[in-house]
Image (spheres, rainbow, N blue to C red):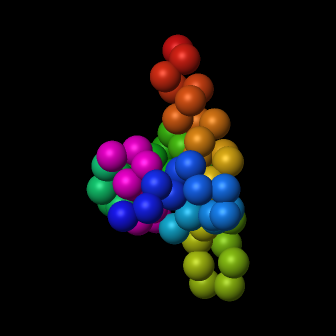
Amino acid sequence: MTDTLNDDRVELLGVKEVANCYGVSPNTIWVWKRKGIIPQPEKFGGCTKWSRRQILNDIIGKYER
């Protein structure tokens, strides 16, 4: 398994990768998205993707509180 969050070659993350970064299930990510708890993703065609940089900054910000 690769460390997606720290891999500079990866810029966009799918729901499974985002869930792995937060240590939760993909269903939790969808709930958090609807509630505005995590950064909002972008749609590319039919795919929903999150910016790796935004997710990393969000996680760092939550630990700094």
Furthest residue to the top?
65
Residue 2 is a magenta residue: no
The residue sitting at 63% across, 64% down in the picture is 10
Please tell me which residue lies in front, 17 or 34: 17
Rendered location of residue 5, percent (x, y): 53, 51
Q: Please give the count of numbered marks on the rendered protein.
A: 0
* Vertical side of 37 occupied by 28: above or below: below
Q: Main secondary structure of the magenta part?
A: helix
Rendered location of residue 16, percent (x, y): 41, 65
Quarter in which the N terminus is drawn: bottom left
Rendered location of residue 41, percent (x, y): 63, 59
The residue sitting at 67% across, 72% down in the picture is 43
The residue sitting at 49% across, 44% down in the picture is 35
The residue sitting at 43% across, 49% down in the picture is 21
Please tell me which residue lies in front, 28 or 6: 6
Residue 8 image-quadrant placement: bottom right
* Vertical side of 37 occupied by 17: above or below: below
Task: Give the residues in magenta.
Answer: 15-23
Furthest residue to the bottom?
45
- Residue 9 seen anywhere in this rendered image of the structure: yes
- Residue 41 seen anywhere in this rendered image of the structure: no
Residue 48 image-quadrant placement: bottom right
Rendered location of residue 17, percent (x, y): 45, 61
